Amino acid sequence: MPVPSLIGLSLSHGLLLDDDHSPALPRPRPDVAAEWHAACGEERPNWKRWGSLGADDKWELLHAVALKCNKPTVPNGAHVSVYKEMTIELVVELRQWSVEHVVARSRVNGSAPGDGEDDPVGWEEATRAANSRRSNHPLVLWSFPGNSLPLSDLVSIEGVTHYVPPANQRARLARKWAFVRATYPYEVAPPSDAQIKHAAKIFALMKTATPFPAEVCVNEHFRNKYGWGNPLLGKDANVWLDSAEFRGLVLGRW
């Protein structure tokens, strides 16, 4: 089936652009990355390399944490998969659990091992079929005009196929996307042109969409157990999101 094209969609939504239509953001000060790392934790844990992880390791680092943070009796407290929004209990019951790298592994350090793919703070829960369907396509992390939805979860924007996750999960995914990009900027390939051009909307969504309780719980688990987490799920999240230099770090302007 051909991928529908959204090439006619306006990609400028109030974001200051420079001459080549990319966000006109300053290059971050060299110490911005260090300040961000300090906010993530005192010292990055010595995570195992992705290629050396066994099934038990992945279960402990992602799926077991999702089950622990699943609170279906709390409003919006159920932990669901990011693409099919299937509850973690059903994912486990159907044995469909899968580790999703929000920033695709092929975008981290090329074909070589990279720290960014090893960090479980950048992972999410997905079903196997949805993980395969997303493949390594860039994610649509912004809303379409009028919150409309395309006819397919795969769309062509600026000649590049993008995967369209559910609207309710985009802020959650964007916070992981920004975490990996800011924490490992020298390893990660630049965002897609469409992500860059929609950057203002992506950052606004991260700021205005309240994190799910399970999202916060997972981050607190990593903070408490490993001393490492995503500052965009902490009390100073808006300080980072309002920083032009931080946005530059995320968007590859270092």
Image (cartoon, grey):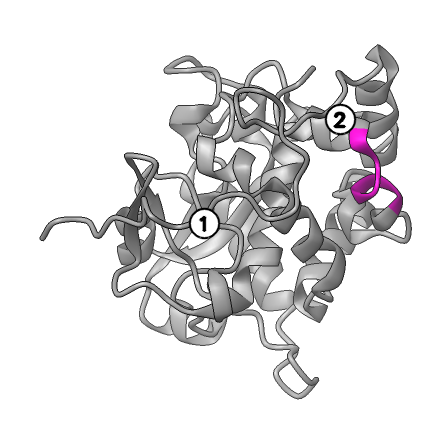
In this picture, is 53 found above or below 92?
above
Q: Are marks 1 and 2 in contact (CB under 8 Å)?
A: no
Where residue 64 appears, as percent x and y from the top left, is: 56, 58
Where residue 38 appears, as percent x and y from the top left, is: 87, 28
Q: Nearer the viewer, residue 125 or 184?
A: 184
Residue at the limit of the structure toward the left, as seen here: 1
**Within-10-Å neighbours for mark 1: few <14, some 14–19, many 20+:** many
For discs 1 and 2, the disc positioned in front in the rendered view: 1
The residue under label 2 is which amino acid type?
A: Arg
User: Quick check: 219 left or right of 49?
Assistant: right
**Residue at position x 52%, y 21% from top?**
20
* Residue beneath disc 1: 140
Name the N-terminal-most of marks 1 and 2. 2
**Residue at position x 61%, y 21% from top?**
252
Q: Which residues are magenta?
A: 239-244
* Residue beneath disc 2: 44
Is residue 165 shown to the viewer in this render? yes
Where residue 228 appears, as percent x and y from the top left, is: 78, 38
